[in-house]
């Protein structure tokens, strides 16, 4: 007996009134967040490294400039008098004149030698009783002024040799100083009464051209001989102002 099986084939046609399904392929863009974060991190690290290298180069340049400045300050000055000897020998002048010239040059040499051998902070008294401070770093202090008031970091006037204090009316006195090429160094303002230090203020120079000031309140009970001075960290005297409180 033959086995008969029925095979049914069904074909599904689109239903009228319904749009056919769009089978066109679509492109979907996906961001790889992990790779983006890695790339940004590498870029930030490179920028930090570049800034660090530039900063080190600038600091090294500042240190080199400071070393050159200190060497230039501490370099001794050699008197230039040998040229006069050569010129005197080459001139056809009388022997007496040559001897006078050589004698004068010799005296100048001895004078220069005495000046070079003099202690750095020695005070010389002139006939006018004015005190002169000898210091290798004094040329780094273009201005030092004693004043009653500071306006916009500048002294308003200058005090002479005396300060008049009225009874029961204290008065402020300011010591203004301007420093050049001393960035990073420490200096001190010292106030002295009758030769004894009564106050000392430490100051750190923060730029190559720097202005600063300290002040002292003087009352009727502070009458006497006063002085205020600028010294460096090694105790070298850079400037001094003397005055009398009356």
Image: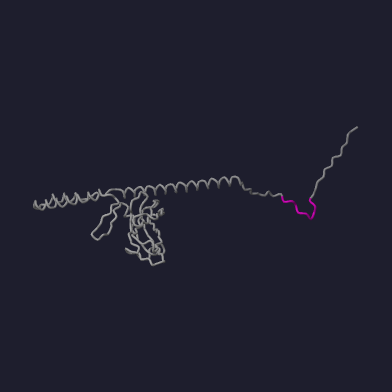
Examine the image and state in which quarter residue 206 appears.
Answer: bottom left
Q: Residue at x 12, y 52 (%)?
A: 100
The residue closer to the viewer here, 28 or 165, is 165
Residue 42 vs residue 214: left or right? right
Q: Which residue occupies 33% across, 62% down?
A: 244
State how many labels appear: 0
**Prevailing secondary structure of the magenta residues:** loop
Magenta stretch encompasses residue 120:
no
Is residue 16 inside the magenta stretch?
A: yes
Residue 170 in the image: state x and y as whole percent: 41, 64
The foreground one among 97 and 14 is: 97
Residue 94 location (% of width, % of height): 8, 52
Q: Residue at x 15, y 52 (%)?
A: 104
Instruction: Give x and y (percent) for residue 121.
Output: 30, 51
- Of 209 and 169, nearer the camera is 169
The range drawn in magenta is: 14-22
Of all residues, the one furthest to the top in this rendering is 1
- The residue lying toward the viewer, choosing from 23 and 30, is 30
């Amino acid at each position: 007996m033959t086995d008969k099986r029925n095979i049914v084939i069904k074909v599904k046609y689109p239903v009228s009134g319904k749009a056919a399904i769009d089978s066109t392929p679509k492109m979907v863009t996906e961001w790889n967040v992990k790779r983006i974060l890695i790339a940004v991190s590498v870029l930030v690290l490179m920028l930090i490294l570049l800034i660090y290298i530039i900063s080190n180069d600038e600091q090294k340049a500042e240190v080199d400039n400071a070393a050159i400045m200190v060497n230039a300050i501490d370099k001794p000055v050699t008197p230039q008098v040998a040229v006069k000897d050569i010129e005197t020998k080459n001139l056809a002048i009388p022997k007496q004149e040559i001897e006078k010239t050589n004698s004068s040059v010799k005296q100048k040499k001895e004078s220069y030698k005495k000046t070079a051998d003099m202690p750095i902070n020695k005070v010389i008294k002139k006939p006018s009783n004015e005190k002169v401070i000898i210091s290798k770093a004094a040329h780094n202090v273009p201005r030092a002024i004693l004043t009653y008031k500071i306006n916009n970091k500048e002294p308003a006037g200058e005090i002479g040799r005396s300060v008049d204090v009225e009874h029961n009316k204290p008065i402020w006195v300011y010591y203004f100083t301007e420093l050049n090429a001393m960035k990073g160094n420490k200096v001190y303002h010292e106030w002295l009464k009758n030769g004894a230090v009564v106050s000392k203020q430490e100051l750190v120079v923060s730029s190559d051209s720097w202005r600063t000031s300290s002040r002292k309140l003087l009352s009727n009970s502070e009458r006497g001989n006063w002085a205020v001075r600028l010294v460096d960290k090694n105790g070298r005297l850079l400037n001094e102002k003397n005055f009398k409180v009356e």
